[in-house]
Structure formats: C-alpha cells, structure tokens
Amino acid sequence: MSYVIPAPIHPSVPVTGSVDTFPVHRIYCVGRNYVDHAKEMGHTGREAPFFFMKPSDAILPVPAGTTGALPYPAHTQDFQHEMELVVAIGKGGSDIGVDEALGHVWGYAAGLDMTRRDLQGEAKKLGRPWDTGKAFEQSAPIGPITPAAQAGDMGQAAITLHVNGAVRQSSTIDMLIWNVAETIADLSTYFTLPPGAVIYTGTPAGVAAVQRGDELVGAITGLDTLRVKVV
Ligand code: MN
C-alpha cells in the first residue's frame, strides 16, 4: 500500500546547537495574554485568554544566524507583527496540572504570530472565524528551539522586537496574564496536547504593520534571536 498522492513533508524546527530538528504537530496560539496588548486591542486587560490555531505548515523555521524570507501575503493592507515566546511540548497529555505543566515542555523559541489585521478585524466584526487573518502559510516564523534545561527559567526573560533597528515591542515574560504553566494546564483541558504541539503564548503591546523590505529582529533572553525580512 502507498499514498495515492505524494505525502506532505512534515514541518520541523531546528534545535539550538544540534543537527536534530523538532517535529511540529499542531500550532496553538493564545489571544490577549499581556495586559498592555489586551488594552491596545480595546479590552480591559482582565479577560481570560483564549486559543486559536494555525496549521502546522504555517511554521516558518529560521535557522540560527540566518534571516528568514517572510512573504508579504495577499489580501491585506495591514500585515502586523506579534512577537511571542513559543513553548514546544515534548510530552503530551490532557488535564495537565499547573504544578506538572513545565515537565511537559521540551524547549522554548522566539516566534512571530504574523497577522492580517484587517481581515482579523473584519472577522471579529462579523462574528466569523479568524483563519484568513491568522492561519495563512508562513504566518508563524520561529527561531531555533532551545531545550528547556538549557534555556533555564523563562519567567523573568525580556522579550523585544525591533523593526529596521527601532524598538517596536518590549516587555518581560512575567507580564503574561497566564504564565506558561497555567497556559499549558488550561489548554490541556480543551485538547489532548500531542508531543510536537507548539504554543505561541501571546504578544505584548506595540503590534504594528510591516512593509516589504522591513527587517524584524525578535529577541528573548536565553534563546536564539529570530530574524526575518518581509519580501
Ligand atoms: Mn498572537
């Protein structure tokens, strides 16, 4: 028996200091998980976060020391960056307790939840799904994944995004409304998390549009820097 069409290539992400790669199963994203970003999107900053997904082949892996080419997508005049800490799940499970959640983490990476904000805004207004705004190809750039033991405690890490050398987003991971352990625990009550799930944990304030030619540099303390150029 064989496949009737060529099987898709399985997306994977480089691992810091290794020739091995991390296979991506599902991409989960957390909405409004920093108070200052929730406020800039017109909310109080106290609502519970919520989840949406991107397909696994939306991942755009950018190896260390390189600059990824990020295509400017069709159907938007407002292509925005959201700089985020990404959590890579190594051990799956459901109903994972907050106390045990970090034991399910294989590693961490710097990521961008790229968004067609005009399409997302239209979908919000009409009560429609966000997929065209959020879940398009190459909408999830990611730097190399650093193993959790090597990354250390991410709780106090700084997170920044520069565009063409100017700072656009700057915060710390301890400003997350729901921290990494709480996010994994809550998400795992809705879904059985498989090994290979990656979670974009939400963005701080400062989201804004990019144009073709812009260079984005995303940095999180202790992790490889993510560099992409919009083409
Ligand atoms: Mn986001």
Image: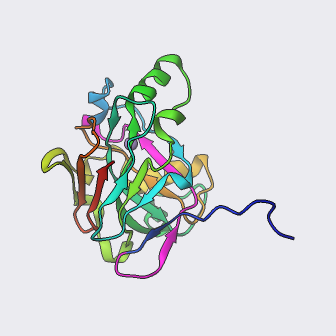
> Is residue 218 depicted above or below 3 in this figure?
above
Query: Which residue reaches farthest right?
Result: 1
Q: Residue at image x 44%, y 50%?
A: 183
Q: Which quadrant of the rendered structure holds the N terminus? A: bottom right
Q: Quadrant of residue 47?
A: top left
Q: Quadrant of ligand 1?
A: top left
| Residue 51 coordinates in the image, percent (x, y) | 50, 41
Q: In this view, does 73 lie to the left or right of 39?
A: right
* The magenta segment: 16-36
Q: Nearer the viewer, residue 101 or 72?
A: 72
| Residue 29 coordinates in the image, percent (x, y) | 46, 46
Query: Which residue reaches farthest top?
Result: 126
Q: Which of 76 and 29 is in front in this view?
A: 76
| Residue 196 coordinates in the image, percent (x, y) | 55, 64
Q: Residue at image x 39%, y 26%?
A: 118
Q: In this view, does 177 lie to the left or right of 127?
A: left
Q: Residue at image x 29%, y 62%?
A: 67
Whether residue 228 appears in magenta in the rendering, the answer is: no
Q: Which of 106 and 227 is in front in this view?
A: 227
Query: Which residue reaches farthest left?
Result: 166
Whether residue 21 appears in magenta in the rendering, the answer is: yes
Q: In this view, does 144 lie to the left or right of 13?
A: left
| Residue 142 coordinates in the image, percent (x, y) | 38, 59
> Is residue 214 depicted above or below 218 in this figure?
above
> Is residue 22 depicted above or below 184 in this figure?
below
Q: Residue at image x 61%, y 65%?
A: 9
Q: Quadrant of residue 86?
A: bottom left
Q: Which colour scheme is used?
A: rainbow
Q: Which of 168 and 185 is in front in this view?
A: 168
